Image (tube, helix red, strand yellow):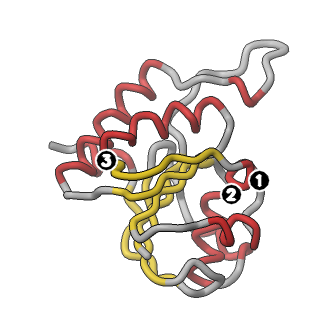
Amino acid sequence: MKLYLVRHAIAEEALPGQPDDTRPLSREGLERFGEVVAGLKRLGIRFDRLYHSPKLRAVQTAERLKPLLKGESQVTPYLAAQPGPKLLGTLQGERVVLVGHEPWMSQLCALLVLGDLEAAGGLVFKKGGVAQLEGQPKPGGMRLLALLPPKVLRRG
């Protein structure tokens, strides 16, 4: 499996009393992540399955990735929590993208590559950043091929 982990794009700050789940992407986040998607397209990256968190900022980020998707999109609460066996057990496809949040995306990357959630401390997962992994989606079963900050993908 080729697995892409994507941290949601830049979101608006929460308004007083606003639930965290309802924070949308900012205008800057929408624009910049559109450029990230264009960079992925230039690299020939396509997905046959997309999973995303139910939080609005992840939903909006996932929507921007749909032009690269030739398959199904699915919301999962497992991307809005610490990664574990339930998330890994749901993954299907050959070229899969997951859209979620920090610190969980770094933890997921560490779990899949090193078999240890606690090893995530050294990973810097910028908003709109993408990690590319390959292998079996199980603890320690994948190789990290790239950890790309959005700035790299936005370059034309």
Judged by depth in the image, the label closer to the viewer, 1 or 3, is: 3
- Which one is in front, 50 or 41? 50
Q: Earlier in the sequence, mark 2 or mark 3?
A: 3
* Tag shown at residue 68: 3
Q: Mark 1 points at which residue?
A: 81
Tell me the crowding category of disc 1: few under 14, some 14 to 19, or many 20 or more residues within 10 angstroms, Cα based. Answer: some
Q: Earlier in the sequence, mark 1 or mark 3?
A: 3
Judged by depth in the image, the label closer to the viewer, 2 or 1, is: 1
**Residue 61 horizontal side relative to residue 119, left or right:** left
**CA–CA distance in space, label 1 to label 3:** 25 Å
Rendered location of residue 129, percent (x, y): 44, 50
Q: Which amino acid does label 3 sit on?
A: Leu
Image: 105 above or below 37 = below
Q: In which quarter of the image is the N terminus?
A: bottom left
Rendered location of residue 141, percent (x, y): 56, 86
**Residue 19 horizontal side relative to residue 69, left or right:** right
- Which one is in front, 93 or 5? 93
**CA–CA distance in space, label 2 to label 3:** 24 Å
- Which one is in front, 96 or 21? 96
